[in-house]
Image (cartoon, rainbow, N blue to C red):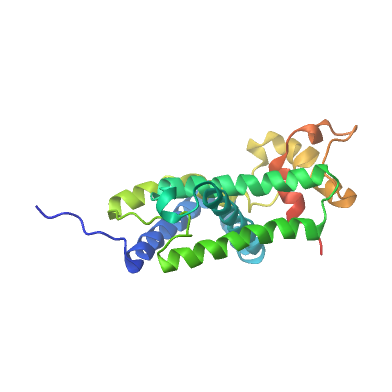
Amino acid sequence: MASEPDINGTTGRFGVYGLVLLWLALWAGVVAWASGIGVLGVVRVLEVWVVHGWGAAVVLGAGWGLGWWVCYGLKGSRNAVGLRDEMVWVLVWLLGIGLWLWGVGLVGRLGLLLPWVVWGWTVLGWLGVVGWCVGFWRGGAGAGVGPTRPGSLVRRLACLGWVVPGVGVLMVAGAVAPGGLWAVDAFGYDVTSYKLQLPREWVSDGWIGGYTHNVYGYLPSLMEGGFAAHNLEM
């Protein structure tokens, strides 16, 4: 009985990831079209991705590296970690992104919301990316995390494809200019009162925390803190 061919080789792996990226692009296009922002709105979303997407890419990369540091520190080697499935791979990535946001929030509340501090935390994550790449391509100990177990096309697409709808929605919603989706967001109250206002004040003051005139600042505000860090000027 013929079985589905293994796709663990380099060509097979990147073929699967290419299909996932295509699925993500199609899903994001559907979300943009269905959101009612119009053709110009879709063009604006694409412009934001191209012009400002590098910042998000830097943070996502740092998140992956921080997740690798945690796994490598806990387990030590690729053979011991046991993170072979893309499902766990994604969860490790999310862990790293959460760590990056938590680190920014910590230094911010210590009054150290400074460009060189944030970049230092980010570079630490990217050093993890370098370590993962070296171990991954060598195929030996040290990769710490990565989809290395032989698997079928269906299994790998199932592991990665489940995150695509949520990522597609976030990619579009995060690139829509304020006002585009206010009909379903309390007509902009949350956006103007703290989601954009607090990061503006935090960047100006060099710290993250609450204000007597804005109680929302006393919330954890990890995403708002990350946005503030993204807008620091060197």
Quadrant where the C terminus sits is bottom right
Horizontal side of residue 37 vs 215, given as left or right: left
Residue shown at 44% from the left, 46% from the top: 88
Q: Is residue 121 above or below residue 192?
A: below
Q: Which residue is drawn at 68% across and 40% down?
A: 182
Q: Is residue 129 visible?
A: yes
Question: Horizontal placement of 104 versus 37: left or right?
Answer: right
Image height of 10 relative to 69, above or below: below
Work out whether residue 165 or residue 158 is closer to the camera in this orientation and state it. Answer: 158
Is residue 196 visible in the rendered image? The answer is: no
Nearest the camera: 71 or 194? 71
Residue 193 lies, in percent from the top left, at 80, 38
Indicate the position of residue 115 as horizontal and vertical percent values.
80, 59
- The x, y position of residue 179, in whole percent, is 70, 46
Figure label count? 0
Residue 97, image x and y in percent? Answer: 60, 49
Depth order, front residue of 55/42: 55
